Amino acid sequence: MENATILSGYSVRLAYAEDSETLIDNLRCGGRVEKTYWFDTDAVAIRCGLKGNKFTARLPIKNDDVFDGICETIDRALDKAMLDKRCLAGDNVRVYLTGLGPRVDVIDYAAFYDHNDIEDVTLTKSVQNLHASKMSQDKLAADIAKRYSLKTLPPNMHCTSNSSLSAVHLGCQAIGSGGVDVVLVVNCSQIKTQDIYFLESQSMLDSVEVQPFGEDSKSVLFAEGFCAVVLESARHRAARQLAGGIRLTSTYAQISAGRSNDAAQLSANLLKVMNKALEKAGVGCDSLCAVIPHANGSETSDKAEALAIASLLSEQSVPVLAYKGQIGYTTTGSGIVDLIIGQHTLSHGELLSPVGTMAIRENVAQHVLLNKGVVKHNKHYLLKMGLGVDGSIVGMVMSDASAVNG
């Protein structure tokens, strides 16, 4: 039990909410994130090689603002955990940097591609954005290490939609091994035009409406944001005279990235991970207050998850909470956002029902909680799932340590 992982602190700055308290308040009120088109007009989008203009949820941030935004997010997460920056300077600490941070935008390159005379370097403003300083995520890691006196550079996990939850899993394993007491996972998600290209190439922007598990949903609502989570060993918390908290037990599987678009293969592996996560935590489905899936609104992965959840739950009454059509899909950081929602769900004994208007897939419709407001519950476990286009699958059981034994 001393090596148990406790979710100690957290913070967000999202297009949907300025902080974690506002995140919960907005969900309680059924608020939706504000959407904006990425391009100025449909004609510009088509001229840039897309089928049409696409919706995103933006933050008013620039590359130059990223470091300050991340530091503010880290400081608020530490404050929530009742810790300060000195706790990150020891040997028993791990820090992970995830997400899509400072990068150049392909549009700036396209503007310069056919006009690269020396005069253009002076006269074309977009050229100035192609400087190496605009795309150095290693520099961002080094700046974080310097600001917080880290013993080592935080690994850069800038890969896929599941990288923050994968980092949380690594943190849980490090704490569970007994050699680490504090883990910080930081996520930075900025959108660039090349991200829009990628999503369209993956058939993840094929519908205007976004609804996780929606019958006709074939899109994600890409959203920007910062988020951070502090994990702490139960031993370290006890030394600070703190008890209880939300405990995390995690399981990981890796399938071939090439099979991540195979719904049957993906569904079978999702089901295996969910069962393994529950087995590792020593609980059954009847003990769960809810399942928070990955469920971002895209057709292929949602179809696989719906099938796996239907197989896992069968006729059991376990609510499924899928928020990414409402708050946006903070790519690479959505796992942390869901953990924060899960923390509230368990510690306050209430389900915050997502909102939506689209019909839900028939095989999972009986489980998906939608448009029901705030629903009270008295259970102490929650299952969170995450998956990535790299084939990674994470299953995480959250439990209220003050209400359960173990």
Image (cartoon, rainbow, N blue to C red):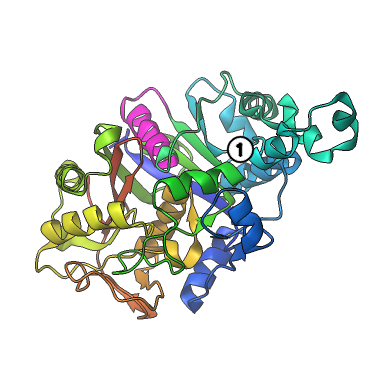
Residue at (30%, 65%) from the top-left corner?
213
- Which class describes the residues within 10 Å of circle 1: few (<14), some (14-19), or many (20+)? many
Is 259 situated left or right of 402 in this image?
left
Q: Which residue is mark 1?
A: 101
Q: Where, quadrant-wise, is the C terminus in this rendering?
A: top left
Q: Secondary structure at mark 1?
A: loop
For residue 202: magenta? no
Percent across and percent down for residue 230 are: 49, 41
Q: Nearer the viewer, residue 1 or 73?
A: 73
Residue range corresponding to the magenta coloring: 164-180
- Please name the predominant secondary structure of the magenta segment in the image: helix
- Identified at 48% across, 40% down, the residue is 240
Q: Is residue 62 above or below residue 87?
A: below
List x then y, in percent, for residue 13: 61, 54
Residue 102 higher or lower than 174, as above or below: below
Q: Looking at the image, which is closer to me, 167 or 382?
A: 167
Asked where in the image residue 238 lies, by quadrant, the reply is top left
- Going by the numbered disc 1, the residue's amino acid type is Gly
